[in-house]
Each structure stands twice: as structure tokens, then as C-alpha cells.
Image (tube, rainbow, N blue to C red):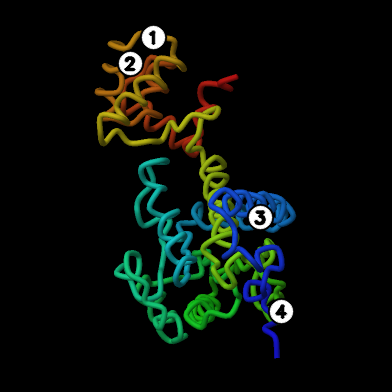
Amino acid sequence: MPDKRLTEQRNPRSARIDLLSPLQITDLINSEDQTVAKAVAEEREAIAQAMEWVVEAIRKGGRLIYVGAGTSGRLGVLDASEMPPTFGVDPTLVQGVIAGGYAALVRAQESAEDFPEEGAAALDERKVTDKDFVLGIATSGTTPFVHGALARAREVGARTGFLLCTPPPQELLDTHDVIIAPLVGPELITGSTRMKAGTATKLVLNTITTGAMVLLGKVHGNLMVDLQVTCQKLQDRGERILMETLEVDRPRARDLLNRAKGRVKVAIVMGKLGVEPKTAEARLREKDGVVSALVGDLG
């Protein structure tokens, strides 16, 4: 009996991929990849809903927690790990849970995904509560580890979502608060969901977290004003942001950034309002960290 999961079906367009030249293989993969963005766009409302719930969770003291196995788990951990350097958030605010633990990031541990109780235990370790939003990622929709984790999240009252790349069964629709299902079609190499399904997953996760951070005031205009200066590259970027937003020269920008202890957002408020760091911090807290609420639209 053929597998009904879209991610496990054979792609007729690549049935003879093993006979193609390097250029033909490149063109075929590129042609398939061009369908991914359209599939993600068709899930725009579900993605926006997930984004809203991430913002709500964080504002009430909760977290966004991704749960996955294999490629899905690695992509969740990757997206979570990029939040602190990009948006200056605490590393615990967005977390990635992968079946097999962090060792599975560098060496596949496929059997780790087969145990739902391990997924539940992983969330117990993170003390998930009803304040959190937990997003399961399983492109096939069937990974036991993910289902076990989401079941535990539901037990404690957390909102849950599911990201998959096959038509969701009614049970999933009835169980979770949001289902995101970009249908990218069969992979060129049957079952190799690190390809189109992986690309779709990366696009969805990027959109959810980037949008959530914008709504939480981590961006002014389109500038990453909540970044923390932890290396020379970020020092340079922070100074350039201040030079542009405040229309000052680099020495002045560097002075403000140093006085703000590397916090670009605080330095902007200091420069715009002519206040000291502690006052800038207090004013930002009053406006939930939204710079434009204090200094106006960047334009």
C-alpha cells in the first residue's frame, strides 16, 4: 500500500535524476525550489496567527519552544540560537528541543525520534507552563517524539502549533491551536525532507520569529536596534546604526554606545532625548521597549 504522506511520495520529475549531468541536476533542483515560497505563502494566515501567539506568550512571561527531530529539530535549534545575537533576547526566550539532545545536531540519531515519552520528558526538563507557546516541527506529521512533547504541553495548558509538509489529518486540526502546512510536494530524492520541506521550514520559522521580534519592539524602522555588542562586527554595526539614526559622526556614536554599555536601543534614546542611560532605560520600559513610541518613526 503506497504511503499517503506527501513527503514520502516519489517525484515523477526526478525519476531519472541519476542519469542527468551536473548542470541538469542543478537546474532541476532549482526548479523544484522555486515552488517552496509559493507553498509557504499559502499558509500566511496560519503563520501570522502563530506569530501573534508567540508575542502574547513572551509578553506574559512565557517562551517559544520548538520541538523536532532530525532536520526539523536542527532547524528549530538553529532559529532559536540566532535570536540572542540578532535581537538581544535572553537565550531562554526561544528554545529548540531536538530528539537525541544536542549531540543530534552534528550526528544523526534517527532512533531518538521514536519515543513519545522522551518528548514529554524534554518539556518537563524545561518546565513548560501555560504561558509558553510550543511549536512542533515534523514535516511528515508523524514523529512520535514531537507528538509526545506536544501532548505534554497541552496537559499543562500551553498553546501548541504543528508545522508539517503533508496534508494534516483531522486529528491534528482538532488537537492544536494552529496548523501550518506548506505543501511543497514530493522531494526530488524520495523522503529527503532536508530539501524542499527543510527550506519551507526555515522560511516559516524565520517569518514567525522575525515578525514576533518586530512586534516586540526589537526593531526600529528595519534596523536591529536591540542587538548586543559582543564582537567587533557588532560594534561596527551598532555604531553605524547610531550614525544613521542620530545623524552623528562615528566618535559620537562610539561614545554613546560605550555609555549605554553596548545597548544600541538605549543609545538611540540617549542621543534623541539627551538623557542619561538610566533615564533612557526607564523611558523604554514605559513604552514596552518600542523605540518609535519615544522618538518617532524612523521614516
Name the N-terminal-most of marks 3 and 4.
3
Q: Secondary structure at mark 2?
A: helix
Q: Evaluate if marks 1 and 2 touch, with contact meaning CB atoms under 8 Å apart.
A: yes
Where is residue 272, by image quadrant?
A: top left
Rendered location of residue 259, percent (x, y): 25, 23
Q: Secondary structure at mark 1?
A: loop
Rendered location of residue 164, percent (x, y): 62, 68
Name the amino acid, label 3. Glu
The local crowd at label 1, few if under 14, some if 14 to 19, many if 20 or more residues have their Cα within 10 Å, is some
Q: Is 267 positioned to the left or the right of 147 in the image?
A: left
Label number found at residue 248: 1
Name the N-terminal-most of marks 1 and 2.
1
> Marks 1 and 4: which is nearer the front?
4
Q: Which residue is mark 2?
A: 253
Q: Nearer the viewer, residue 286 or 90?
A: 90
Would you place residue 118 above or below residue 96 in this image? below
Distance in Å between CA atoms under marks 3 and 1: 47 Å
Name the amino acid, label 1. Val
Quarter occupied by the C terminus: top right
Instruction: Look at 41% across and 75% down and name the residue there.
Output: 123
